[in-house]
Image: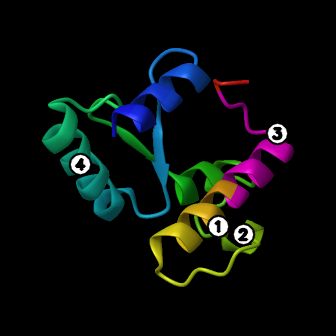
């Protein structure tokens, strides 16, 4: 977890941000691991929902980002993380400004 925290710190400008398609669910795991193994969570206490980010682009509360994934959503953590990273990258390609740029 320390290597993960260091990796995030090296790549982010300022406070790293937790972004997930189901941040309420996913957050509990990442937060527990950081607190259990490091005694702190370098992500702080907030998160951003990937779907909500996408809904702002077309200004449509019913817009769905899932077509931006290349990796199939299987509920396997690695597949889902890859798919979410792909969707976030595609949103960046569509004009989303990401602080680490």
Q: Which residue is mark 1?
A: 83
99 left or right, relative to 18: right
Which residue is located at x 45 percent, y 26 percent? Answer: 6
- Gap between marks 1 and 4 measured at Cα: 22 Å
Secondary structure at badge 4 equals helix
Which residue is located at x 47 percent, y 78 percent? Answer: 76
Verify CB contact (< 8 Å) between mark 2 and mark 1. Answer: yes
The disc at residue 95 is 3
Residue closest to the eye, 37 or 85:
37
Q: Work out whether mark 2 precedes mark 1 in sequence or the reverse, and give the earlier one.
A: 2
Q: Work out whether mark 3 precedes mark 4 in sequence or the reverse, and give the earlier one.
A: 4
Q: Which residue is mark 4?
A: 33
Residue 93 visible in the current orientation: yes
Verify CB contact (< 8 Å) between mark 2 and mark 3. Answer: no
Verify CB contact (< 8 Å) between mark 1 and mark 4. Answer: no
Mark 2 surroundings within 10 Å by alpha-carbon count, few (fewer than 14), some (14 through 19), many (20 or more): some
Secondary structure at badge 3 equals loop
Q: What is the residue that sits farthest to the top in this orientation?
A: 14
Verify CB contact (< 8 Å) between mark 1 and mark 3. Answer: no
Q: Quadrant of residue 96?
A: top right
Does the magenta stretch mainly form a helix, a strand or a loop?
A: helix
Residue closest to the eye, 97 or 61:
97
Q: Which residue is mark 2?
A: 69
Q: Quadrant of residue 38?
A: top left
- Gap between marks 2 and 1 measured at Cα: 5 Å
- Gap between marks 2 and 4 measured at Cα: 26 Å
Secondary structure at badge 2 equals loop
Image coords of residue 90 (percent x, y): 79, 54
Mark 4 surroundings within 10 Å by alpha-carbon count, few (fewer than 14), some (14 through 19), many (20 or more): some
Q: Quadrant of residue 85?
A: bottom right
Q: Work out whether mark 1 precedes mark 4 in sequence or the reverse, and give the earlier one.
A: 4
- Viewer-side label of 1, 3: 1
């Amino acid at each position: 977890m320390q290597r993960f925290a260091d990796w995030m710190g090296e790549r982010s400008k300022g406070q790293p941000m937790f972004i997930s398609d189901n941040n309420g669910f996913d957050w509990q795991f990442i937060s527990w691991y950081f607190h259990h193994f490091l005694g702190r969570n370098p992500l702080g206490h907030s998160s951003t929902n990937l779907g909500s980010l996408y809904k702002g682009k077309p200004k449509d509360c019913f817009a769905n980002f899932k077509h931006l994934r290349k990796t199939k959503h299987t509920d396997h953590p690695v597949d889902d993380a890859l798919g979410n990273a792909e969707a976030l990258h595609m949103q960046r390609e569509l004009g989303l400004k990401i602080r680490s740029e």
